[in-house]
Amino acid sequence: MNKPKTIFEKIWDSHIVHSQPGFPDVLYIDAHLIHEVTSPQAFDGLIKRKIPVYRTNRTWATADHNVPTKNQDLPIKDLLSKIQVEKLTKNCKEFCIRLYGLGHPFQGIVHIIGPELGITKPGMTIVCGDSHTSTHGAFGAVAFGIGTSEIEQVLATQCILQNKPKTLKIKVDGPLGKGVVAKDIILYIISKTSASGATGYFVEYTGETIRNLSMEARMTMCNMSIEMGARGGMIAPDETTYEYIKERRFAPKGKQWSSALQYWKTLPSDEGAQYDRVLSFGADDIEPMVTYGTNPGMGVKITENIPFEQDFEKETDIKTFKRAMDYMGLTPGIRMEDLKLDYVFLGSCTNSRIEDLRMVAHIVKGRKKAGNVEVFVIPGSKQVEVQARVEGLDKIFEEAGFELRGPGCSACLGMNEDKIPPGKYCISTSNRNFEGRQGPGARTFLASPATAAASAITGRITDPREFL
């Protein structure tokens, strides 16, 4: 009798091209996603060695990290961004790779367009030169970020050298409380495990709470797996997954759909499969969450206060806390809901899908933003932007004083024009609150779209349950 396997083991083992004790596995990659920031050096390596892209039909490109979100029809002003986007266009043309650049109806953040186009499917191995590639694991795929030299490996061979991670099962059970969404679940888990608590592991999220999440909510969960140090995160496919994929552009059709479905249903972890580690959480303990420090693990329930130095035991944690308080300009023990804001950022590969925008619109409809905040709404893709306008969400945002812009990574990272000014406070639906992440000196609080929307109305960190 075969040994029971986890979904991760099934996919990883079936993609090993070569394995040798003491060495990384040679792993076949089903889908390679590239963008303008981490791919130029990889292409330069191919050009210097006169090597073609081995399987062009397995690579998809888009421009997202550096692109402006205003006036996308005009030439890019920032010189570095302009060079990188032009380089991507040139490389894709030269190597015959399909590109969804600025102006294309499929352009958007790489981890948004993969699922919405049906590129992302269960049982696949997926890589991208971006740490939040773990997003695609929501479909029951082994997806992880890679470095530039590894991008070159995949372009040249459609394979990559990788050490097999350990497995971590995270189980969440019970119904979610009012105003609690996927972002709160993952911020809660990271606050309990720490920003390095899953280092060396590939996470599988299970349990009743996870099963009841929509596909878009599952993507939010898996997106932030990297923020607790994990190599990636995944959720076994089910009817919710299949329904989402069906009829999308790159989804299997006809007989191929039936065949794919048959295979996908074999993927969930076998009963009795062994994990290297298991963690369990109850949904009844999760409330709307918000971070106070400079890593995603420094989070508390929105109704709580910033901790005190004596709440930490390890010397390294105390040092990190003191440095975070200094950078954030905050005082230990103060209420999170007393903190005033300057900016609200609604976007990023974590929370810029149509479901996220609908969540925001539901809270702000008929209301106005506070006078002390500036609010950006950045759809994750051109398709999301079009859908938002079709549904009239743009009008709701406009009436509330929110600015709806074009798709891109935007103020998630200080790599384009949408930076938060030094010393200013921003509540953000993105995934990282590191020092300078949203711009030099910017101070970031991570939260859900619901919490960010409520906070935009009051001008301070606000419990979304007040508006529900």
Image (cartoon, rainbow, N blue to C red):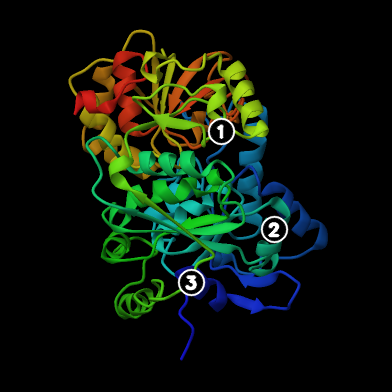
- Numbered mark located on residue 295 in the image: 1
Q: Earlier in the sequence, mark 3 or mark 2?
A: 2
Quarter of the rendering occupied by the C terminus? top left
Between discs 3 and 1, the one toward the N terminus: 3
Which numbered circle lies on residue 451? none
Q: CA distance from mark 3 to mark 1?
A: 31 Å
Going by the numbered disc 1, the residue's amino acid type is Asn
Query: In the depicted view, which residue is nearer to us: 168 or 404?
Result: 168
Task: Residue 229: give x, y in percent of width and height.
Answer: 58, 48
Lateral position of residue 13 relative to residue 238, left or right: right
Q: Which residue is mark 3?
A: 274
Within 10 Å of disc 2 (Cα), the crowding (few <14, some 14-19, many 20+) is some
Query: Above or below — where is 276 with respect to 64?
Result: below
Query: What amino acid type is highlighted by mark number 2?
Result: Glu
Q: Residue 4: image x %, image y %?
A: 45, 80
Query: Which residue is painted at 46% across and 91% down in the image?
Result: 1
Q: Which residue is mark 2?
A: 150
Which numbered disc, 3 or 2, marks the residue closer to the eye?
3
Q: Residue furthest bottom?
A: 1
Is 278 above or below relative to 391? below
